[in-house]
Amino acid sequence: MSTTWTPARVVALFALLVLGALAGAAGWLVVDLWFPGGLVLALLALLGLFLAGRLVIGNGIGVGVPVIGWFLAYVLLGAPRPEGDFLLSSTGIGMYAYLLGGIVIAVMCATLRGPVEQPVSAGRPGR
């Protein structure tokens, strides 16, 4: 599949990268603050962001770019500092559920077929 790299598309991808990083940082804070409800809220925010990226860009790249931003924020906030402590601590299983849930949502959004795309049939190869 060939996509044209227009300046508007590049700006949209950069905005999705920044929004992914912001969603990752906000999700980390919310999951730690209000555990069961915060986890659901953070995962719903990721679902909205990934679906919006898919719809705006029109293919899986629209999901992959915010996933990169989200994952970088997740890893950087969880890395230990030189002093030996963490920037944000993760308590319990909530952060692992946030990581696994975010990955599952990203895969689901990346493999969705939109309403504009035609179904693939056995007689006609997909585009």
Image: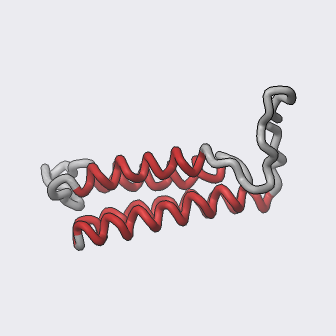
111 vs 122, left or right, is: left
Give the quarter of the figure containing the C terminus. top right
Displayed quadrant of residue 34: bottom left
Q: Is residue 26 visible?
A: no
Q: Position of residue 111 (x, y in %)?
A: 61, 43
63 vs 127, left or right, is: left
Q: Position of residue 54 (x, y in %)?
A: 65, 56
Give the quarter of the figure containing the N terminus. top right
Point 54% across, 65% down: residue? 48
Front-lying residue, 107 or 28: 107
Q: Position of residue 110 (x, y in %)?
A: 60, 46
Q: Tell me which colouring the rendered structure shows.
A: secondary structure
Point 46% across, 67% down: residue? 45
Front-lying residue, 11 or 101: 101
10 vs 80, left or right, is: right
87 vs 65, left or right, is: left
Point 71% across, 61% down: residue? 56
Q: Is residue 111 visible?
A: yes
Task: Count the marks.
Answer: 0
Residue 85 higher or lower than 25, as above or below? above
Residue 105 higher or lower than 36, as above or below? above
Q: Position of residue 14 (x, y in %)?
A: 63, 58
Point 35% across, 50% down: residue? 99
Front-lying residue, 106 or 24: 106
Which residue is farthest front?
Answer: 122
